[in-house]
Image: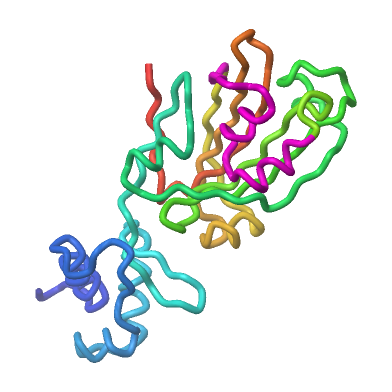
Amino acid sequence: MPGVTLWRQVADQIADEISRGTYATGTKLPAETDIAELYRVNRHTVRRALAALRERGLVRPARGSGTFVEAPRLAYPIGARTRFSQIVGASGRQAGGRLIASAVEPAPPGIARRLGLARGALVVRLELMRHADRVPLCIATTCLCARRFPDAAKIYAAKRSITATLAQLGVKDYRRASTRVTAGAVDLGDAARLDLRPGSPILLVDSVDVDHAGRPVLTTRARFAAERVELVIES
């Protein structure tokens, strides 16, 4: 391919191998030295090719483990009943989540307003990691009324599901009352947890869910890795 730089030629050939299934989703690519030998280029060229493939969303480097073929973006519908585990499971992937941190603290004004609480009322704050097939998709900060749900953190740590946690706390069903979607750049802390480069694009989803009586149950700010998720707004 005259006129095409070497790194782009290597990137295009690896992309073709991925599209033909030679490297399946989740497969670890050969080491840089092996790729360099295969295409008869230097390692700098290989690194530039892999960087281009990452920008295209085709591969994902894992610290200390190598470079893996990335799954296609997950279509994540947002509707009246948005359930992470169901959405990920419907895509054929294994949903997972874990509690990163929790605290009981006075609600900031914005959180108190969303939850319909008095200023300074206590909330349970949950910091959650959510993933599909062990690939991190989002970090979520979820707040609930501490008076109504004092054991939310302990239950989520065991259940690893918001729906299961609320069910144990007596909320058998809940629905989305509002959703606000914006875009931003990942900060250093979330970048490390999501295995993203600092400054990578993220999708910010601020939401409020209510129970059958219309009372606010929880409010969440989720930070999705934009290269792994596409949000679908259901009407």
**In the image, 204: left or right of 24?**
right
Which of the pair 110/89 is nearer the observer?
A: 89
Q: In which quarter of the image is the N terminus?
A: bottom left
The residues colored magenta run 151-177
Residue 70 placement: quadrant: bottom left
Residue 171 falls within the magenta-colored stretch = yes
Q: Which residue is drawn at 32% across and 57% down?
A: 56
Residue 137 pos. (x, y %): 48, 49
Q: In this view, does 209 lie above or below 16?
A: above
Colour convention? rainbow
List the single residue furthest toward the right.
120
Residue 33 pos. (x, y %): 32, 90
Residue 231 placement: quadrant: top left
**In the image, 108: left or right of 10?**
right
Q: In this view, does 99 lie above or below 121?
A: below
**In the image, 30: left or right of 201?**
left
Q: Which residue is drawn at 45% across and 47% down?
A: 95
List the single residue furthest toward the left.
1
Image label count: 0
Q: In which quarter of the image is the C terminus?
A: top left
Residue 21 placement: quadrant: bottom left
Residue 63 falls within the magenta-colored stretch = no
Which of the pair 37/6 is nearer the observer?
A: 37
Q: Residue at x 34, y 38 (%)?
A: 90
Q: Is residue 46 above or below residue 79?
A: below
Q: Which residue is drawn at 31% across and 60% down?
A: 58
Residue 4 pos. (x, y %): 17, 72
Residue 217 pos. (x, y %): 67, 22
